[in-house]
Image: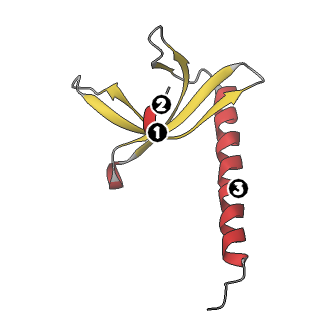
Amino acid sequence: MFENGTFAIAGEDGKPVRCEVLFTYDCEANGRSYVVFTVGEGDAQQLFANRYTANDAGEPQLWPLEDEAEYQIVRGCFEELKAKLMEQANEQTAEPQAEA
């Protein structure tokens, strides 16, 4: 659905704005799907989280998070992902270097 980790949304001026997907998450507890993505670059980069569904053409349709419970779902997933990435980074730095 999110081809090559990107998708576009209409900006305030109606022009397409490129979004970079950080991760998606399908929550079994409520049957909903979530996407966390960034818009912009450098100091202007912003982070967003939305619920999504597929429209009839198979394209993502974004919906705002409805309540604190949904924010907690996304926040928990983000923290879990961050912990896994830190663990992987620590494992890579702890691996003995091969001698030449």
The numbered disc on residue 64 is none
The numbered disc on residue 5 is 1
Q: Determine which quarter of the picture holds residue 29.
A: top right
Give x and y (percent) for residue 46.
41, 44
Locate residue 71 relative to residue 11 in the image: left or right.
right
How many labels were placed on the picture? 3
Helix, strand, or loop for circle 1?
Answer: helix
Write down the residue under mark 3. 83
Q: Which residue is pictured at 71% across the width and 48% down the height?
A: 80
Helix, strand, or loop for circle 3?
Answer: helix
The numbered disc on residue 2 is 2
Helix, strand, or loop for circle 2?
Answer: loop
Q: Nearer the viewer, residue 100 or 85?
A: 100
Q: Determine which quarter of the picture holds residue 84.
A: bottom right
Q: Which residue is pictured at 66% across the width and 27% down the height?
A: 70
Give x and y (percent) for residue 59.
45, 18
Locate residue 60 relative to residue 27 in the image: left or right.
left
**39 versus 91 height, above or below:** above
Q: Which residue is pictured at 33% across the width and 36% down the height?
A: 18
Tell me which amino acid carries mark 3. Ala
Q: Nearer the viewer, residue 69 or 13?
A: 13
* Foreground label between 3 and 2: 2
**Disc 1 to disc 3, C-alpha distance:** 21 Å
The extreme right residue here reads: 29
Q: Which part of the image, by quadrant, shows the C terminus?
A: bottom right
Tell me which amino acid carries mark 1. Gly
**26 versus 39 height, above or below:** above
